[in-house]
Image (cartoon, grey):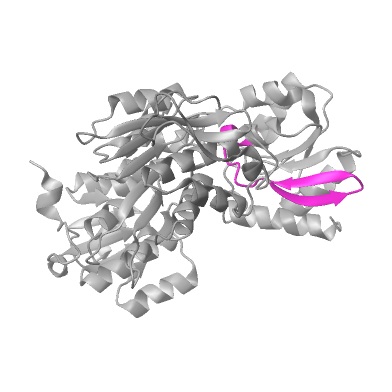
Amino acid sequence: MDLRNMTLPDSWHGSWSSLKAVVVGLGKSGFSVVDTLVELGVETAVVGKTAKPELADLVEVIGSKFHASESPEVLSELGFRPDFAVVSPGFSPSHPLVVELEKEGILVIGDIELAWRLRDKHDSIAKWIGVTGTNGKTTTSEMTAAMLLESGKRAIACGNIGVPILDAIRDPVGYDYLVVELSSFQLHYMGQISLQIAAFLNIAEDHLDWHGDFDSYLAAKAKIYQNTLDVIVFNEQDPKTLQAAKEAEVAPGCRAVSFSLGAPAMSSVGYVEEFLVDRAFLSDRANTALELCEIGDIEQISAGSTHLLANAAAAASIARACGVETGFIRQALRSFQLPPHRAQFLGQVNQVRFVNDSKATNAHAAEASLGATESVVWILGGLLKGVNPEPLIIRHGAKLRGVVLLGAETELLEGLFSAHLPGLPVVLAAKNDPMGSAVQLAVEISKPGDTVLLAPMAASMDQFVDYVERGEKFVEAVRKLGAK
């Protein structure tokens, strides 16, 4: 018996007004949750240790209440017993408040499941495409949305990306496709949903502090495939995504399609010489391939990296699964621009290049930046999230000209650099102006021909609001140098 379906309505038009809810966490997505629930007539309260004052004020304006606490005791202050809780992704399952909610028998869900239940707000229901992976999911999601938009479809990239999914659900007009970026946190709290297309891009160690261990992290990521209706997409170069695809319980008739950095096998999208080609979505795929674009169309986005080529192949696989014609894929890639803070070239000062990859919040992402760069002064550090940075330091040590360390775990990083790269200049950024001092120290270490690379390999919340603020501070400091 599925107690979830007995507890909560499965429609925007269901009997929500008789229910009570607590929303845990008041960020951008948390506010979209409370705003939605109030619109549905649910009696709602919001809890969280901190929140932006403007969001806390808005909660009161729309008819809810914000309690500035995330301790289990706050539940007794709500004035009612919740029927369910919607938990923001930042709260791990081991958080005392989440543990208390489950102990009290209160249903715990995330914003993705809530949005799935409310997806029928419009008569025409959008098809859901899900994208996850340790890295590349934002770029792939936005590329996919761009291809769909180019073909004339109403589409939006949402979820763990700019627009909260509940805001997309409540759009006055509605969409043909929602391209939903899904983090492992969101997947952990996600109940039974059925995506039209699900893509699992890659996996490497990340968020082990949140999930507890790598197997739990992988299991959360693999949930994206459950009940998929049409196509699941996996990475031919990442055997764990293939294994997850093999083990997935999907709808009858659902196809498995791979993307590859090499020549594609049948039922794959990949590269032949200078072309991205499709051998999955054409009638004679056993003997022919369909040209989608040239590698040059992708490399105009950013200096060619294997990660960018993989993202383009994954996005093209998804777009082809939606029936997008080749010309629209080519045009979308030719006009595509990476979001800020992803391998963003900022210019040069005295023949020293500056690259902002603040979005490189784990070792897998930092590896892509380091792999595409020679002679590096590396700015890194922050919250390592339980991941061991040692293998990456060893692999790329030969190209390092110096290191500037930021954030909470500098002692660990200092020890690793000292052990493996004795003699390499390693300096600490000032705590009162971490990014400004980091850039100045990097300039002092660098020589003509070097690249000063911000690829932190860590989360940012010990010193910055998020990776965006961290990247903006880097951009600001580089601009003060007069970079061109």
What residue occupies the far left of the structure in this picture?
1
State which quarter of the image contains the C terminus: bottom right
Residue at (17%, 60%) from the top-left corner? 11
Residue at (44%, 62%) from the top-left corner? 28
- Up the image or down, 275 lies above or below 474; here it is above
State which quarter of the image contains the N terminus: top left
Is residue 95 visible to the viewer in this orientation of the structure?
A: no
Q: Residue 14, percent across and down?
A: 13, 64
Left or right: 468 as drawn, with respect to 36: right
Which of the 4 image quadrants contains residue 215?
top left
Q: Residue 97, percent across and down?
A: 32, 49
Please give the range of residues in magenta. 344-366
Left or right: 116 as drawn, with respect to 420: left
Residue at (30%, 77%) from the top-left corner? 63
Which of the 4 image quadrants contains residue 441?
top right
Q: Residue 402, percent across and down?
A: 81, 33
Residue 451 magenta-drawn? no
Left or right: 468 as drawn, with respect to 254: right
Q: Residue 257, percent across and down?
A: 38, 31
What residue occupies the far bottom of the structure in this picture?
61
- Up the image or down, 233 lies above or below 68; here it is above
Is residue 419 visible to the viewer in this orientation of the structure?
A: yes
